[in-house]
Amino acid sequence: MKALLLKAVGQPLALERVPRPRAGDRELLLRVRACAVCRTDLHVIDGDLAEPRLPLILGHEIVGEVVARGPEAERFDLGDRVGVPWLGGCCKHCTFCRSGRENLCDHPIFTGYGKNGGFAEYAAADQDFCFAIPPKFSDTTAAPLLCAGLIGYRALRMAGDAERLGIYGFGAAAHLICQLAVHQGRKVFAMTREGDEAGQEFARTLGAIWAGGSESEPPEELDAALIFAPVGSLVPRALSFLARGGTVVCAGIHMSEIPSFPYEALWGERAIRSVANLTRRDGEDFLALASEARLDVHTESFPLEEGNEVVARLRRGAIRGAAVLHPGSLS
């Protein structure tokens, strides 16, 4: 099969022919129909996430068709369409797993990092960490839901019942969570890269009542701020706009250093917290809610062969919504 391989950190992906994977005992073999490209893929390529399995097939927002099953795999039938997220497995025995916090597992397995992912024609995945895809979503629109949507949803949950919600970094996750927040009756204030007027207009079309650059001050105090951009300096910036009791949620898996700030900025029961990975319950709840909310998933589709160009465009913020790779024909 053809696949995009990361052979060394900091190097371009290599398009090569590699053996097709086989389904293990509790695994599904999937013919990949679509795989979205996530900023986490950039962090793996750049070495921000240490010690990826190399050579590695990236990609953890996979939509695939079940074409074979391992001898103990019974959750899905041949021909079913399933989604594969970042969390590809957990130990199921540690304190975190036993308390419903498998996202913090002591020995997790991550798709497209500790095991091969979906930048390929086929992928193998643990049946217990696959989701049924709601029929209303196409392969292309379903793919970004499996990380951008899921991580965004977990971040939104950590905002509690915040009515005035700030969103920093308006990429794949933010454009989905903006819509979900509006669906829930919240007021969204969007902060994009400085000078990105097109991005600000995009945010307004999705329901944000205000949009400006990341250095701008929103017109109202925020009850919570979700930070999707991997820029540590945004943390004290967002904190300065929080109402008492508000929360800054850092939603990325990697962020640059957070500058120091005075205790006064945190005082008043303000809080800063991070989002780590996801749970299977997150996936089930979010996919059901995504169908109900009628999310308008904005995507740009590309053949697998253009993977390096897609990575470059994502790095410079030139993707509106989410980029999706297709190893076969575009759909």
Image (cartoon, grey):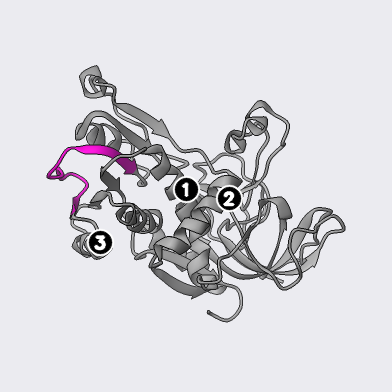
Q: Residue at x 33, y 39 (%)?
A: 161
Which corner quadrant holds the N terminus? bottom right
Label 2 residue SS: loop
Q: Residue at x 30, y 34 (%)?
A: 235
Residue 34 x/y as whole percent: 57, 69
In the rendered structure, which amino acid carries the disc numbered 3? Gly
Q: Residue at x 52, y 44 (%)?
A: 47
Q: CA distance from mark 2 to mark 3?
A: 27 Å
- Residue farthest toward the bottom in the current orientation of the protein: 329
Identify residue for label 3.
199
Label 1 residue SS: helix
- Look at the picture and state if 19 lies above or below 91: below
In the image, the segment drawn in magenta is 210-226
In the rendered structure, which amino acid carries the disc numbered 1? Ile
Residue 205 left/right relative to 303: left
Q: Nearer the viewer, mark 1 or mark 2?
A: 1
